[in-house]
Structures are given as structure tokens and as C-alpha cells.
Image: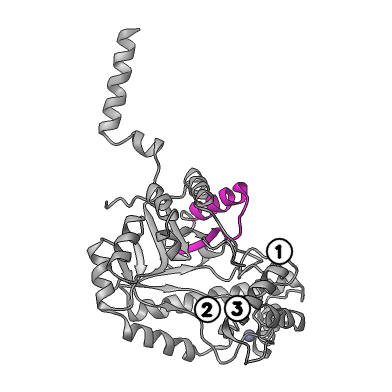
Amino acid sequence: MNKFRSMLLSVVALLSLCGCLNFSDKTDPKIRRVFCWGMIKDEASAARYAAAGVTDIRVRSRQELMWVQKYGMTAYCNTITPSGPHPQVLSPEEEKYHRYINGLDLPKSTPNTERKKIINQRRREKGHRFGGDRLNPVDTLNVNSLPCFGCDTDFAFTGRKIDSILKKAVPGVQGIYMDYVGYVNHRGCYCKGCLERCQKFLKSRKLADTPENRDLFYQEQLISYFNRVVDYIKAKRPDFKIVAHIYPEFEPNPLYGYLTGADYCGETVSWYFQWSPEKIAKYTTAVVNRKQLAPGCVGIPFIGVSTNPRSSLGYKSPADVEKELQIILRSGGDSLMVCNGDSMIAPGYFEVFQKYCSPQSR
Ligand SMILES: [Zn+2]
């Protein structure tokens, strides 16, 4: 028996030496890479982001780049958002809701603090979800409007915008962030151009004019635009890495990131409003496993964190965030994307991220 035990121990020791068994990783898994949507304010904040486990963050100046590099993080320039010739068009019902939750009907003379208070109350009242996790039959984004990117058919608007961002990029940054490529109402745009292209799409594929088939058109328009942005940036800056968040949510297919050419694609596994542990685990597993389907695009679990209990943007305590990180790790996630980024350095939250996020380089 003793002989058998010592043989077994020798085999285990040998496997450990070869790196075949890594007990510390199995018992104490960590998140190795963290893409943060926060901004650097000063050197102290750069140091604190790094200590919280952030590995990737945007910078606006040479000074910020120096701080980011000093603390071992990777720097990105600005965020590219869609551009087009006119705003997206909503249905009359969506338009009415949109104006209400964004206070677009309020008199211009309404003082800012009063305006914010009213908007906050209205969003709570309606169960507004800030572009993800829709609860009600109608929900729209918390911005005044987004341009109809589908109508930027010659890419003139978006091309000019990308050129301008790349021109202003601080030398030394290694990529660009990408956001807001999506529909204000989570489904589509009803402008003349989009409606015409949709009909053409249905006819060319001999598809009936049903909501499901229209979703197919809007998904194709979305992904094709997304990848056109990626290709344009890569043509100008082949060295650049593209970090995206799939947002606002495309309801017919929320996890379409694996169809995009982004290098790192954040896909929501937990929105600002608390999701059940089962849903977080299910979404994380889907995002992480899609790595194999699209080797060029790495799926990154995205979590939304609001630290303000009075905000209509939901609230998570540090203990709530800790539970979510544990679920993500248990579900195979070893990377993370976080917004609001500054939640990572807020007291109480900082300690949680520091505990679970430990980049390999440190
Ligand atoms: Zn449109």
C-alpha cells in the first residue's frame, strides 16, 4: 500500500513539474485580463486601476499614456461610435416613450438638476433598462438619438470620423474601443432607406415579410456595418487591436459578437440590473465557449456596475459584485470587461476586483 502511495505521489510530482497539473489555478482561479471603460484622472487613479486588476484602458494624452505604461497596462485611443446621414427612426409608440424617458419634452428652461431628477424618476417609473435587458414591450436607449449607420452606404460619414480619431491618437496607443453600434429600440431602424433595403433583402432571399425575417435583415445590416468599421480601421492601422462592447443589445440575438471581426468583443453576461446566478452562468459559458467558433475574436464577459443606490441605472453592492465574479470564474471566464469603469476603483468595490482580478504579468 505504501509502495503504491509513494508511486502515486511520484507521478503527481512529475505531472506538476511538467505543468500538466496546476493546483493553484484549480483551487484559486483568477481573472487574467480586464478591459475597463473608465478614464484616468491622475497618476494615483492609474495606479489604483492597475491594482484593481485592469490591464486595458483608454488614454487622452501623452501624460495618461505614460502613467498607463508605468503601471503595466495597455493603452487605447478614443471610442469609435457609428455615424450616418440622419438619426435612426423609431415607431410612433417607441418615439413617444423615448421622448418621455429622456426628457426631450421638457421645456428648455428646466434647470439641469431638476431635469436630471425628473428623468431619473421617469426611468424608474417605466422600468427603463439603458439599452439592455428589456423588461417592457417598448424600451429605447438613454441617449437622445443614434445615427442610422445603415444609411451611411458609401461609408463617408464613418470613414471621416475614424480618420479624425486615428489622427488624434496619442502615439504609442495599441488600439481603439468601439461602442453604440446598434439600434436605439434594440431591433431596427424604420427610416426610408432601411425599410427599402429590408424589402430588397427579403425579396432577394425569397423570404416572407415577417418580424423574424426582418430581424434577419437588421442583424445582417448591423454585423456588416460593424465589420466594415473593423476593416476600415485595420486597413489604416493594421497594428491596432479593436475592443468592442456589443451595445445596445440586439434583442433577436444578444450574443452575436462571435460574428464580428473585433479582436476583443465584450458581451453582456450581467447588466446593471441584477441577473439571476443561472443567467450569468449561462451567458458567461456561451461567451467563453464561442472563442472556439471564432478564433479571431475573443469573447469577453461584460458586467455593468452602478455604485449609486439612488440611480435609475440599478445598483450592486460590493458583495453582489463579488458573487458575480465568482459565478463568472466558475463558468470558465478568465477575462472581464467593466462599465462603469470607475466602479472598479470605488471604495469597497476596489477590494473585490483586486481579490479576483490578477493579471498574469503581475
Ligand atoms: Zn435607418
Check if residue 51 falls in the magenta segment.
no
Tell me where residue 10 appears, x and y as whole percent. Answer: 27, 21
Say which residue appears at 31% left-offset and 81% top-offset: 169
Secondary structure type for disc 1: loop
Report whether 150 appears left or right of 163.
Answer: right
Q: Nearer the viewer, residue 10 or 284?
A: 284
Q: How many marks?
A: 3
Q: Secondary structure at mark 3?
A: helix
Question: Which structural element holds mark 2?
Answer: helix
Determine whether, in the image, residue 175 is placed left or right of residue 331.
left
C-beta proximity under 8 Å, tags 3 and 2:
no
Specify whether residue 262 is in view: yes
The kind of residue on which mark 3 rests is Lys
- Report the Cα–Cα distance between label 3 and label 2: 33 Å
Q: Is residue 251 left or right of residue 361?
A: right
Give neighbour class at mark 2: few <14, some 14-19, many 20+ (Cα, 10 Å): many
Q: Bounds of the magenta span?
A: 263-290
Mark 1 Cα within 10 Å, few/some/many (few <14, many 20+)? few
Residue type at tag 1: Leu
Q: Which disc number belongs to residue 116? A: 3
Residue pointed to by mark 2? 225
The residue that mark 1 highlights is: 135
* Residue type highlighted by circle 2: Tyr
Ligand 1 picture quarter: bottom right
Q: Nearer the viewer, mark 2 or mark 1?
A: 1
Q: Nearer the viewer, residue 89 or 345?
A: 345
